[in-house]
Image (spheres, rainbow, N blue to C red):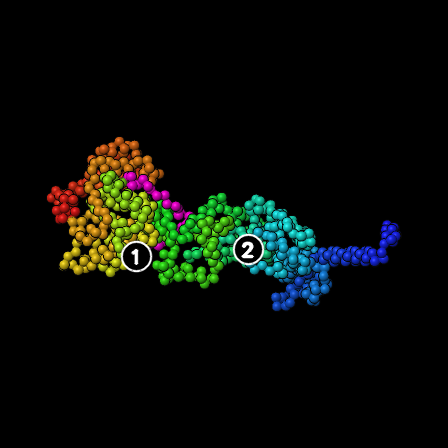
Amino acid sequence: MARETFLQSNDQGSPPEQHRSYDQLLERIASLEAENQDLKKNREAVVRGQTINLISIDAAVPSFAYLDEPSWSIGPKKEVILTAHFPVDDINGFLRQKHDIAFVVTRFYNPKTQEIEVQNASRAKQPLPMPKPSSETITFHSKDMIDAAEQFFARRPDFARNFPRFNIRAPIPAPYLFWYHCRKSNAMQGLSPAHEALLHLVTNWIEENYGVKYDFVDRQLDRGVISQDTLPFLFKPGDVIVWEAKRKIHAVIARSWPQQTSASASSVNQQKKERDRSKDALDTDKSVSGWTVESWSYQYDGNFLRKKQSVEITCSAMSSDEEIAISQLNVYPLKYAPEAFMPTLEDRGKTFWSCRYRKVVSYDDDKGVYGVGERSSGERFVVDFQTYQQLHSSSANFKQRYSSLEAQLCERMDPGIMASEDPPSAPDIYIFPNTIPGYDLRSKKWVDLEVDMIRDITWNKKSFDHLVVDSEIKELIQALVIRQIASEQGTDIIDRKGNGLIILLHGGPGTGKTFTAESVAEMAEKPLFRVTCGDIGTKPEDVEKYLESVLHLGKTWGCVVLIDEAEVFLEQRSLDNLERNALVSVFLRVLEYYEGILILTSNRVGTFDEAFKSRILLSLHYENLTKGQRTKIWKNFIEPGSRKRKFQDQSTGIDFDDIECYLSELAEYELNGRQIRNVITTARQLATFRGERTSFQHLKHVITVSRKFDTYLKTVQEGYSDDQIARGEGVR
């Protein structure tokens, strides 16, 4: 009526062309409304899933497909038969004709899995059990459904990284772990209404069939327990998986769902119960169920690589529903690990990252692997894989250990990421290797360091203050070292010649020469590379080769190189000993071009070759200790800062106050620094043996006993001391 009124009013004085234009517009609107209704009908039609049941009698025979659920029947020969009534000859052809199917549920049945159970029920005249599928999958079928699923998975954090080969059209196996781990989050956020509706169609079906089990698993995990039936729910791709072996924590990142590799207790025990039903004895044997999870972790060969590996999971239980603590599994997700695991792994990752190029580190070797006593804490190592590779790449051990990484075609870390100062974030920070090659500066060997024991060096700047030598000597050494650090420029015209700082320290044993070198290294914040003539050898060709390698490493790592007991290389050349002349010449030539800090110590310079005077920038003589210097050395050993560092003894301890009262008396004994240290060490061992605290009496007893040998030796030497004899021979 309204339209007629409008047309009538529009007829009064309106052109005929406008009538036609208005009619065409109304027709177009009607057409669009009809088309919209058709689209709605088509959309509403694609709202269902289709279940297809596959029955397999033999692996060699193709499965039979049915639309209805199968049921049991007993054949004429009492055999168990699994049958259905609505077969599908061509599954793909059937699905192509059905445009209203969004997803397909496929259930696989194998009569043999329930054969014994059905036969027993038949013999007992009991109702036959319901057929149970051996497996089940969901496949996204329609294009709209596939598009919706793609959008859904694309919004999952790190999905592409955790599933690099994911195929959206491939069947997804039950119990649909992907949805279990997404169901409590805002899984559908960001999807279009149409995509959200399609996904709800699938997830609602999953919830109807598996929601009860999901809730049961939630309650188990809240209590920190799991069973063989529910173990696959414990792990998901992207999880950090950890375990402990040989007191070391290992960690990897999962990149697959658990895949069962051995029968669970449910199937094994069920068959045993059926076979042994007549037995009264309770079978107490536990069954072990196994799974594997594909994973990856970082390996290091100078660069970081993603090494792929399979992690085996085992669960031992009396039955498939027996609950066990998650922590009792051989491996488990990091979130269920002891509280200390996460910070330990994070610190390991940060430490390894800081050592990826070159670093001088301190090492807390509490197991005594690389030393005993005071070496067990704070020992210095150099981590430098590039140098390690240059020196040992041809060795069988290196090839066996690192060539396999190349053979596995491991994915290498991007150089840009490698160059970043910031280490990777979680979860990658948790999966770094637990060992790294390091060079032991004392033993001169490459060893595997446990990364968890590596620490940043705390340089002992006060050690130079504790050096008991004349103040003018200390000032001169300090000035030269600081200047060398500030500027490595020499005055020689020839490039690379004379740019080093070479110092000779001469004096009797225990006067502080070695401690001077150690203090210089601490003051300069450089590692101390100590070698002796025993390390170097005496053959000229060996000496040159060894010295060049030592000084090369010393320069590369910025070490303070200490050549202890260097008198064999400093001795004056003569006409009757050509081999010694060659040895001295080699040493002179090597020193000529060294550019770092080099300290030589000797207690025999009476035969000093003149050529060394121009090579050595500073030569210092260390007199025998005075009483005041001995007092200071004794005091250094017992002052508060040294007590914890040098005398860690939790069993009996040391009576520092008692010893401090007798410092003056102790200083009366003419002992050098090394002898004082030996006295304290021996006295501690004596006190520990007696079950007493170390006191002055123990120290005095050790000094008295040890001096008997010194007295006898002096008698043999006709009353002359070692210093007097050395001066008499012209060597000191």
Between 293 and 667, the one nearer to me in the picture: 667
Residue 152: image x %, image y %?
Answer: 63, 54
Q: Give, as a single range, the part of the protein colored magenta.
A: 445-466
Between 582 and 142, the one nearer to me in the picture: 582
Asked if residue 216 lies in the magenta stretch, the reply is no
Question: In this orientation, does residue 5 appear?
Answer: yes
Circle number at residue 374 = none
Residue 219: image x %, image y %?
Answer: 60, 45
**Which residue, given by chain and number where applicable, does mark 2 sit on?**
162
Residue sitting at x 54%, y 52%:
238
- Secondary element under disc 1, as helix, strand or loop, is helix
Q: Does 469 sit above or below residue 612?
A: above
Relative to 467, 135 lies left or right: right
Relative to 250, 486 lies left or right: left
Q: Does 294 sit above or below residue 368?
A: below
Between 80 and 527, the one nearer to me in the picture: 527
**Which residue, given by chain and number where applicable, does mark 1 sit on?**
549
Front tag of 1 and 2: 1
- Secondary element under disc 2, as helix, strand or loop, is helix
